[in-house]
Image: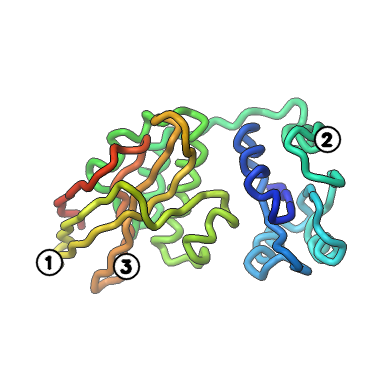
């Protein structure tokens, strides 16, 4: 694992750069305005990868000094530029071996096996593998995050996932799912527009979406994945199902 620290003004272009280069071993950490150090949650991640290589763009000296207690800075362009050759060569070293990705459907099935509280609607993966391959990394990351979220791991607020994990969460949208769920002897119904997303203003296959809901049962909360795949048509869908 490597880390890229950038000032908040460059967060979005930094994410786009990582996506363009298909870099999957670099975690992006955003330095907020006037911040003197990474957050406690970020420090806990850095501690797990003590000594890891890192790059930094336009972070203040105090912040850098604190971060340097955990990482080794190898690349520090004075300014963040999307086309910066030094940064690009650090992100994609010569001779890098490409990492093979799981198909989105396989990633979600594996995630559901890891967490009994992550439930896949029977039709959730029907269109998952129609995503273009450069969105498979997003689907695999989303599957892993939802498995951890369902298991009760503290990942912060969903709206913070974009900053922490480069996975964008939206609470509302033009697509909604009504669910009528029977789980053993309990019945729940509700409506959700919650989704993880990557890709806007692009083709349907490149606009990756993961729709899900968190539902409380007497034995604890469960997270149900309702749809994975290209952006579905706008509108409301009703799903009736029985899943233990």
- What crowding class fits label 2: few (fewer than 14 Cα within 10 Å), some (14-19), or many (20 or more)? few
**Please, which residue is most extreme toward the bottom here?**
218
- Residue 174 position within the rendered picture, expressed as x and y whole percent measured from the top left: 32, 47
Viewer-side label of 2, 1:
2
**Please, which residue is most extreme toward the top here?**
95
Label whose residue precedes the other's in the sequence (1 or 3): 1
- Residue 147 position within the rendered picture, expressed as x and y whole percent measured from the top left: 42, 55
- Residue 211 position within the rendered picture, expressed as x and y whole percent measured from the top left: 34, 49
Image point 24% across, 74% down: which residue? 218
From the viewer's perspective, tell me whether residue 171 is left or right of residue 42: left
Residue, disc 1: 185
**Element type at marker 3?**
strand
- Residue 215 position within the rendered picture, expressed as x and y whole percent measured from the top left: 28, 64
Q: Which mark is residue 147?
A: none
Image point 22% across, 44% down: which residue? 122
Image point 45% across, 58% down: which residue? 148
**Element type at marker 2?**
helix
From the viewer's perspective, tell me whether residue 112 is left or right of residue 200: left
Residue, disc 2: 86
Viewer-side label of 1, 3:
3
Rounded to the nearest whole Å, what is the CA distance between mark 2 and mark 3? 46 Å
Image point 72% across, 50% down: which residue? 3
Viewer-side label of 2, 3:
2
Name which quarter of the figure residue 32 lies in: bottom right
Label whose residue precedes the other's in the sequence (2 or 3): 2
Foreground pick, 158 / 217 = 158
Residue, disc 3: 221
């Amino acid at each position: 694992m490597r880390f890229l620290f950038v000032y908040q003004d460059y967060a979005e272009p930094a994410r786009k750069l990582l996506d363009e280069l298909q870099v999957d071993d670099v975690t992006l950490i955003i330095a907020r305005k006037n911040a003197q150090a990474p957050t406690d949650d970020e420090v806990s991640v850095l501690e797990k990868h003590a000594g890891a290589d890192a790059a930094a763009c336009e972070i203040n000296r105090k912040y850098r000094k604190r971060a340097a207690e955990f990482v080794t800075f190898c690349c520090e362009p004075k300014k963040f530029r999307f086309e910066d050759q030094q940064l690009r060569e650090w992100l994609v070293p010569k001779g890098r071996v490409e990492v093979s990705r799981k198909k989105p459907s396989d990633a979600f099935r594996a995630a559901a096996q890891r967490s009994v509280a992550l439930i896949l609607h029977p039709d959730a993966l029907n269109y998952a593998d129609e995503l273009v391959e450069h969105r498979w990394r997003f689907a695999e990351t989303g599957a892993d995050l939802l498995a951890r979220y369902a298991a009760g791991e503290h990942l912060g607020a969903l709206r913070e996932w974009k900053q922490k994990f480069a996975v964008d969460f939206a609470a509302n949208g033009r697509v909604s799912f009504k669910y009528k769920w029977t789980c053993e002897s309990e019945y729940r119904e509700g409506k959700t527009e919650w989704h993880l997303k990557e890709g806007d203003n692009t083709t349907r296959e490149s606009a990756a979406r993961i729709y899900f809901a968190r539902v409380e049962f007497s034995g604890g909360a469960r997270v149900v994945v309702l749809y994975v795949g290209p952006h579905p048509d706008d509108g409301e869908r009703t799903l009736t199902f029985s899943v233990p």
